């Protein structure tokens, strides 16, 4: 990733962009050159005019990044506990790799953006290209934002004012929860950007407002906006001031917009309130509450969630399903609109809140400013030339991520293109392919940014936001598909038809109809075999390639009689709202992950699966997802049986994966792909590795060996076996759902 002062040049003629990231390991602010995103379904593609740095939230992120490992740990004790548990189950080295990978993930910054719509994704209504919109887009020259997180900017509102829309919505949502009425007395504790916006909104509501802060400049602005103030830096008696301000009754409510680890703002709020007063936390504070403070006055306390109803609801934010206005009057988007209306009417003054302006190329200086000792408030990033731009073609961009990285590399089967650059692709698959000697030419992802970062980190020549850049490149012989589950089958079909070898992350498909489409596409290009140039199809069923599984296979092949398998998977809980739990998006966890273990048993038996039975947890109050707490029993053609207990309701300290095999008076036990123990096996009692190995590297190497082989049919897993395992996984999920 290039530093903020000297970004890498883009490929000639390519339309890339600059985007601001935070390095969590060092705290350094970086400006990366990445492909511009494409407008996905339900999204707007926006060319940025301005974006606002949130001095509170973003400062905390930068300070966290600059902290040492010990300080990071102190700030996140829950994460420390998770690390300790992972060391116990997965081993020290695997845990260290996971921690390093997490800290190596650059964090995109910003959530207050205004710009011009240049393209509309499928299914978008109510917006048009060429109009200005405010959104929660990042600090980037182009952003792709779901439609429900955008709002049209009135002509009377300038770009700089519109950049305050999202922060204004945060303030507005906090105020709505406090339910102020005309004439009530309110305190705003903490006069940063959100606090000063909250103050103005309360004044527009007809409330009297008392502002509290340590900063003299912010207190002066509060008075300019019609509030009375308390200077905490001068030890002014806030309790007496609140009593006098409320005419001896206690204030009606307090909106805490401060950012501090101290519990003091909440204690002060409780002290200042009248009986049955309302306290709403909009900022971040300590939350060690005193029961007596709240009990005696019957105080209400509520934490406000960001912009309003819809926040963190994938159905609303990502899928575009709006709440009926008759039942949810004020959603995130409708709060955006309300703020913009107030800006247009001059009821909110943002001009006085801007302290600094920087061009996007000076992003590093902007963050130095909010961290420095000099006073700062609203820090704007500007995008020169953006306002005069006309709506452009929505086609995605391909840029040079690592110049000359691919120069002189041969083209052919082992020249690889990646579609998908998420966590697993960037942390596991890309390094594995590079280590195995593959010439990775291009990485593509819809966001563009993920592709750019992954390509830069791993020395890949090109990054793109368009999968077609991979599928249509004649130099690429093999395609790696590591996108969201619902896109796998379609991309596999396209890649096969393009004559590419395919390595697709599990699952292969989410429905039997998709498997049928893959079979048809595959039939259209002929049977597997690299010798005649026909494609190899591989699914990332890596468990069978682990050294422990291969040793088990060698031992079990020496026993002729049927075997009994018990696979226990302590899967861990995932919220019902997570995309992997969604039937249409992730397919559910039996399809999305349990397929690994179906494949492992299929490999170890070496026999076809003849029967499938599933028992899922019964319906009960509080059980929203049943198919991630299920037992799958498989019957094999050789008489073997295997049961996969896939349970998401266990404890994290217990190992995730355990396999037991019983046969011919002998037992094998595999614990979490670290330790294999045997009883009754001549010459074998156990095998232990110094670190966990689930076979990811060997799986990739087997695929590359197959596509480079001179032997027809030299494939790690046959096409029919892949289809069989995928079919059984889909059928198991259907049976679990009832």
Image (cartoon, rainbow, N blue to C red):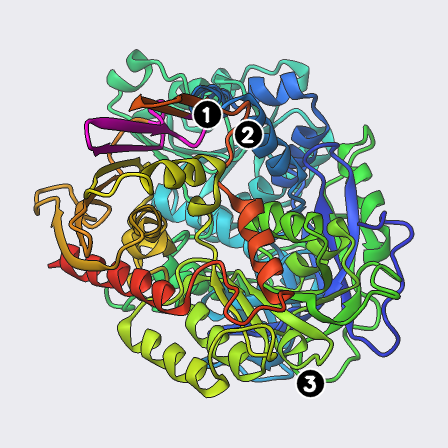
The residue positioned 58% from the left and 20% from the top of the image is 73
Residue located beneath label 2 in the image: 94
Residue 97 in the image: above or below residue 307: above
Q: Residue at x 88, y 58 (%)?
A: 8
Check disc 1 and report its element: helix, strand or loop. Answer: helix
Of badges 3 and 2, the one in the foreground is 2
Horizontal and vertical percent position of residue 78: 45, 23
Q: How many labels were placed on the picture?
A: 3
Is there any visible trace of residue 183 in the rendered image? yes
- Distance from label 3 to label 1 (Cα)? 47 Å
Q: Residues within 10 Å of mark 2 (few under 14, many from 20)?
A: some
What range is drawn magenta here? 652-675
Q: Nearer the viewer, residue 698 or 521?
A: 698
Are the residues at dot 3 and dot 1 in contact (C-beta closer than 8 Å)? no
The Cα–Cα distance between marks 3 and 2, rounded to whole angstroms, is 45 Å
- Residue 656, image quadrant: top left
Q: Residues within 10 Å of mark 1 (few under 14, many from 20)?
A: many
Q: Position of residue 49 (x, y in %)?
A: 73, 67
């Amino acid at each position: 990733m290039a530093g903020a002062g000297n970004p890498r040049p883009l490929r000639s003629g390519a339309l890339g962009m600059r985007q601001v990231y935070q390095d969590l390991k060092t705290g350094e602010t970086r400006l990366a050159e990445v492909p511009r995103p494409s407008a996905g379904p339900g999204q707007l593609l926006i060319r940025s005019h301005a974006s606002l740095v949130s001095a509170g939230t973003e400062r905390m992120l930068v300070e966290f990044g600059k902290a040492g490992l010990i300080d990071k740990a102190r700030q996140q004790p829950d994460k420390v506990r998770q690390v300790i548990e992972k060391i116990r189950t997965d081993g020290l080295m695997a845990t260290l790799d996971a921690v390093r990978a997490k800290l190596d993930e650059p964090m995109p910054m910003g959530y207050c953006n205004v710009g011009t719509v240049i393209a509309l994704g499928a299914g978008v209504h109510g917006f048009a290209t060429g109009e200005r919109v405010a959104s929660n887009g990042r600090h980037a020259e182009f952003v792709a934002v779901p439609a429900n997180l955008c709002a049209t900017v009135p002509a009377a509102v300038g770009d700089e004012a519109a950049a305050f829309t999202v922060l204004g919505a945060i303030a507005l949502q906090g105020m709505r929860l406090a339910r102020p009425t005309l004439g009530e007395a309110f305190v705003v504790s903490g006069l940063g950007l959100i606090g000063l916006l909250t103050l103005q909104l309360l004044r527009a509501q007809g409330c009297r407002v008392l502002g509290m802060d340590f900063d003299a400049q912010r207190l002066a602005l509060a008075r300019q906006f019609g509030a009375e103030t308390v200077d905490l830096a001068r030890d002014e008696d806030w309790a007496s001031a609140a009593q006098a301000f409320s005419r001896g009754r206690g204030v009606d409510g307090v909106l805490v917009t401060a950012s501090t680890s101290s519990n003091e703002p909440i204690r002060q709020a409780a002290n200042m309130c009248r009986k049955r007063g309302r306290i709403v936390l909009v900022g971040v504070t300590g939350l060690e509450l005193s029961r007596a403070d709240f009990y005696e006055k019957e105080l209400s306390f509520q934490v406000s969630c960001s912009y309003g109803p819809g926040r963190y609801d994938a159905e609303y934010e990502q899928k575009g399903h709006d709440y009926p206005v008759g039942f949810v009057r004020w959603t995130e988007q409708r709060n955006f609109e309300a703020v913009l209306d107030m800006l247009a009417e001059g009821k909110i003054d943002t001009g006085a809140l801007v302290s600094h302006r920087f061009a996007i190329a000076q992003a590093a200086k902007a963050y130095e400013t909010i961290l420095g000792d000099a006073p700062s408030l609203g820090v704007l990033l500007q995008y020169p030339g953006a306002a005069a731009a006309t709506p452009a073609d929505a086609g995605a961009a391909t840029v040079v991520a690592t110049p000359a990285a691919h120069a002189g590399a041969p083209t052919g089967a082992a020249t690889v293109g990646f579609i998908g650059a998420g966590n697993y692709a960037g942390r596991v698959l890309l390094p594995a392919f590079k280590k195995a000697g593959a010439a990775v030419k291009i990485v593509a992802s819809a966001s563009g940014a993920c592709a750019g970062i992954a390509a830069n980190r791993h020395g890949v020549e090109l990054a793109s936001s368009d999968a077609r850049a991979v599928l249509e490149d004649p130099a690429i012989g093999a395609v790696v598909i590591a996108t969201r589950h619902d896109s796998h089958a379609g991309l596999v079909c396209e890649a096969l038809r393009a004559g590419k070898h395919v390595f697709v992350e599990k699952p292969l498909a989410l429905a039997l109809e998709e498997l049928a489409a893959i079979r048809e596409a595959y039939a259209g290009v002929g049977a597997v075999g690299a010798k005649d140039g026909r494609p190899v199809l591989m699914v990332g069923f890596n468990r069978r390639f682990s050294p422990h599984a291969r040793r088990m296979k060698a031992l079990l092949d020496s026993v002729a009689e049927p075997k009994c398998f018990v696979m226990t998977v302590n899967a861990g809980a995932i919220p019902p709202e997570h995309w992997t739990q969604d039937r249409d998006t992730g397919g559910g966890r039996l399809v999305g992950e349990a397929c690994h273990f179906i494949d492992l048993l299929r490999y170890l038996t070496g026999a076809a699966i003849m029967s499938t039975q599933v028992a899922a947890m019964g319906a009960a109050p509080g059980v929203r997802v049943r198919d991630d707490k299920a037992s799958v029993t498989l019957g094999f053609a050789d008489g073997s049986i295997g049961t996969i207990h896939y349970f998401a309701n266990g404890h994290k300290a217990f190992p995730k994966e355990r396999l037991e095999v019983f046969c011919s008076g002998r037992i094998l036990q595999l614990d979490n792909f670290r330790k294999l123990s045997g009883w009754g096996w001549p010459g074998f009692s156990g095998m232990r590795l110094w670190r966990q190995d689930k076979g990811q590297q060997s799986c990739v190497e087997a695929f590359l060996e197959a596509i480079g082989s001179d032997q027809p049919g030299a494939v790690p897993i046959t096409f029919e076996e892949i289809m069989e395992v995928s079919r059984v996984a889909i059928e198991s999920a259907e049976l679990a759902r009832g």
